[in-house]
Image (spheres, rainbow, N blue to C red):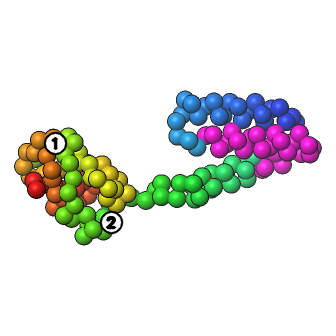
Amino acid sequence: MELSWWHWLVGGIVLIAAELVIPSFVVIWFGLAAWVVALVVAFVKLGLTAQLALWLLASLAMLFAWFRIFKPNQFKTRIGLADANVIGEIGLLTRRVAPFEKGEVRFQKPVLGADVWACIADEAIEAGARVKVLAIEGSFVKVGRV
């Protein structure tokens, strides 16, 4: 079976359109890699194995560029990082918090990469109150009244 350049072009369109259904911003790179193969196959005759290898290499190159160059901090976690830098920060409670209930606190400037954090507290605090970070517990900040 021999694939023509337009097969790759249509396959790329299908993959790029699939990105609308699967909003992960990953499938688009496979579609763009198919367009690269379509461009190459339009000018150079390649066998099926070479076309698939080129598609694989182009896909990997685009994924690598996306995750390493354009989104370098995508997989960094906030958990367990630099507690001392966060303790004492003042924020505004945007969602009520109570014992055994999660709330949400917003900081004026990002704290460990995020300006909104899920929070817990030992006492009930209504939304709109100013709170101070007392500790980091897992992926939550523990807050108390200012």
Q: Tell me the quadrant of the picture where the C terminus can be found.
A: bottom left
Q: What x and y, as percent, mark residue 11?
A: 73, 33
Looking at the image, is 137 positioned above or below residue 125?
below
Tag count: 2
**At 78% from the left edge and 49% from the top edge, which residue is drawn?**
54
Question: According to the image, label 1 marks what residue?
Answer: 128
- Front residue of 63 and 108: 108
Image position of 14 (left or right of 142): right
Magenta stretch in the rendered image: 27-54
At 24% from the left edge and 70% from the top edge, which residue is drawn?
84
Q: Residue furthest left?
A: 123
Given residues 90 and 40, the one toward you in this image is 90
Q: Quadrant of residue 76?
A: bottom left
Is the residue 41 above or below the residue 72 in the image?
A: above
Between disc 2 and disc 1, whose residue precedes?
A: 2
The quadrant holding residue 137 is: bottom left
Residue 40 lies, in percent from the top left, at: 85, 45
On screen, 31 above or below 137?
above
Q: Is residue 17 left or right of residue 137?
A: right
